Amino acid sequence: MSQAQGASVSACPNCGIGLPDHSAIATDAQKQIEDLQAQVRLLTQKATNAVDRWADYEDEIQELKAQNARTSEEAARAETSSPNRSSYLPVQNRLSSFLARKSTPNLKNPAPPNTPSATDLAAALTREQALRQAADKKLDEASGELEELSAQLFMQANEMVATERKARAKLEERVAVLESRDGEKRKRLERLEGAVARIERGDERVRRFETDTFTSRPCGRLQTLVKSGVRRYVRICTSGGVWKFRRQKRDMDMGHTHPDTPEYFPSQFRYNEVSPTFSELPTITLEVPDFEPWINELWHDFLIEPTPYLVASAISYLGFVLLVSRYHSAVWQLLCFMFRFVPWDEDLGLG
């Protein structure tokens, strides 16, 4: 645990979260494994030396046993051969008998050989047995220590391997989480880039709309329609009741232009007398599209004979115009927001 706490901490390059440096832990574990292997080799060498000494002791014991057997055999031979020699000595005369008697003690009392006795051999054997037992005991102790160290080494190695596997699993899980976050960030970035592109396209459309509305057509479409309607009314009033558009023939064929008729419609064109106010006004030649006669018709009917329907329509249109003129800035901001932030390309299938 101290090694793990003492290990240096590195930072993730993507998110900056601190991660433990497992290379230092692995280096310390490798050093511990090498130290334990060196201890195992030393203990193995000690055990080998003890076994060699044990074999040497056994060889010495065998040699001592053989030497003891040889010395005991030689002593038995000497004891059996000395009476035979004294009995065969000649006793013919005194001189020879004297010489024989004199030489016999010399043969009986030779210099004792420098050989160990049985007690010494027994003591040496006992000592060798004690040494052998001590060597066996040391060998057993060394074997037990070797087994304990081997078991500890394997346990530590297993623990280190398990720790490394857990750390690797955590790192892999962390990497998977970071990769998933990177994928999500990439998708968000792509969506933001698409939104920015849509905003840029919306800005371009707004700029083109502003350019088309305020630069090329400074009056605006509504103002143009109002002016064209007024001019059309003035031209109709000053032209002596001659209508110059496509519905003229249809309205003349219908003929229901008087309020007393049962099929009278207020929205139809009527040929009334021109007011003396507009009799002196000049005719304004103006080309208008085909959808503007309806507006002119409503305007004419509202001025000549206003009906509830026409009054309600006029009030609605007037209220709409007043609302737009009062809150034109808010309406303009709403339009800009819609052009910028609404994904028109995706909705219309143009993306």
Image (spheres, rainbow, N blue to C red):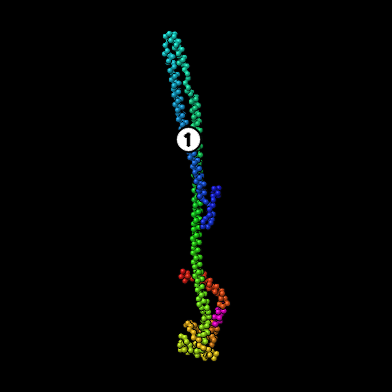
Q: Residue at x 50, y 43 (%)?
A: 35
Q: Is residue 319 magenta?
A: yes
| Residue 267: percent from left, percent from top | 51, 85
Q: Is residue 323 left or right of residue 58?
A: right
| Secondary element at image label 1 | helix
Let me know if residue 1 appears in the view: no
- Depth check, front residue: 339 or 301: 339
Let me know if residue 322 appears in the view: yes
Q: Residue furthest front?
A: 215
Rendered position, 263 above or below 180: below
- What residue range appears in magenta? 314-323
> Magenta stretch mostly in which secondary structure?
helix
Query: Residue beneath label 1, please?
Result: 49
| Residue 270: percent from left, percent from top | 50, 88
Q: Residue at x 55, y 83 (%)?
A: 311
Quick one: label 1, few (<14), some, or many (20+) residues within 10 Å? few
Rendered position, 120 above or below 218: above
Q: Residue at x 43, y 15 (%)?
A: 85
Name the kind of residue labelled 1 in the image: Asn
Q: Residue at x 44, y 24 (%)?
A: 70
